Image: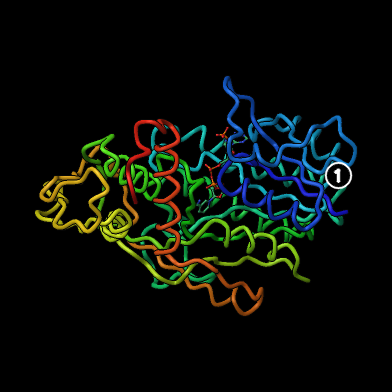
Amino acid sequence: MKIALITGINGQDGAYLAELLLEKGYMVHGVKRRSSLINTDRIDHLYQDPHDANVRFKLHYGDMTDSTNLIRIIQETQPDEIYNLAAMSHVKVSFDTPEYTANADGIGTLRLLEAIRILGLEKKTRIYQASTSELYGLVQEVPQSEKTPFYPRSPYAVAKLYAYWITVNYREAYNLYACNGILFNHESPLRGETFVTRKITRAVAAIALGLQQKMYLGNLDARRDWGHAKDYVKAMWLILQQETPEDYVIATGITTPVREFVKMAFAEVGAEIEFTGEGVDEKGFIKSITNSGFSLKVGQEVVLVDPAYFRPTEVELLIGDPTKAKTKLGWEPEYNLPSLCKEMVASDLEIFRKDDKTQWEHLAG
Ligand code: NDP
């Protein structure tokens, strides 16, 4: 039985990856940091009582800022594969917590690589590093491939740049099977509520159910290459199954402005959105309605711009070239943006309805 260790197991990707590896018959260990409230919602369905025989899913308390603890966990678990998904993953928040982000996202990766070396596991343990399209930052080339130069534009991206290169360096210096997956944005119903796609689908659901009147967003012109996290964790696994360790861009190759995603999400509740004005004065309102089962009104102002959500340095356009992943790994995504958006809006409607079933059960859609 193969043994995997996932850092950031209770994050969006950690949850989907753990599910995939369990399906493939792995023993899955996860690193989870201590929090004052239990925050394992995304992985609760995978829980196995540690007292039972043949347990294949186990959590360990740990933190990317604590070397001794990472060394101990790796020594105890002796993983064949490590997936380093733990990170302070929010770009805007990294401007508020730059030093912590560098420590957890940058040096944290070094700590794992060193742990493998200290424990003499260079020949046994393969490691995947969660690199990001944010490395491309200020656009140097379109679309962005494994050969495109990096130009990070946030403390998050700069920390991830260190993690990227230290992973390459340990591969070259010590012959480690260490790879970067340069993943473009990937979303799902499990996406954190403060990331723009989830913020939009939650707000659309709340507005449709009459729980909220409008949403405030940042840069509506920002364009992103959005895929589904479920597809992207399959690529992570494939990257560690190859004969030679290499780095791969994982993307859909299609880019969409935030404004279009807003329209797509409202279409799921039967509302057509029109935008008027420019810059901070741009507004979105409901132009027409085809589903009368929701609490929506024609003319209702539903989107406003709040400059507080602008990044000090913006990344305007991300669009990835996944040719290498498709040809070498045989990776093909199953979802497209409309099917992803549909799933996210449906899930958020369900969440709000469950919160107060008696109040909303009469609503259709
Ligand atoms: P999430 O924010 O959903 O999950 C991050 C995970 O890391 C959480 O489990 C979090 O725990 C954990 N974590 C944060 N800081 C620490 C720490 N100091 N020690 C231990 N664990 C920590 O991110 P995603 O699942 O979306 O992303 C997974 C990885 O992929 C991240 O590294 C992210 O930067 C990267 N990435 C993501 C992309 C995306 O579009 N989703 C695109 C490209 C890269 P807690 O719940 O306690 O906060």
Look at 33% across and 48% down and name the residue there.
Answer: 364
Q: Quadrant of ligand 1?
A: top right
Q: Name the residue carrying label 1.
A: 78
**For this rendering, which residue is in front, 248 or 155?**
248
Name, please, the residue furthest toward the top.
36
* Residue kind at label 1, given as amino acid type: Gln
Asked which secondary structure carries label 1, the reply is: loop
Q: Relative to 43, is 287 above or below?
A: below
For residue 270, side relative to residue 12 (left or right)? left
**For this rendering, which residue is in front, 72 or 259?**
259
Picture quadrant where residue 263 is located: bottom left
- Picture coordinates of residue 7, whole percent (x, y): 67, 42
Look at 74% across and 32% down and name the residue there.
Answer: 60
Picture quadrant where residue 255 is located: bottom left
- Picture coordinates of residue 148, whole percent (x, y): 48, 69
Name, please, the residue furthest toward the bottom.
327
For residue 106, side relative to residue 350 (left or right)? right
For residue 110, side relative to residue 290 (left or right)? right
Quadrant that contains the N terminus: bottom right
Look at 60% across and 67% down and name the residue there.
Answer: 248
**For this rendering, which residue is in front, 339 or 59?**
339
- Picture coordinates of residue 30, whole percent (x, y): 72, 40
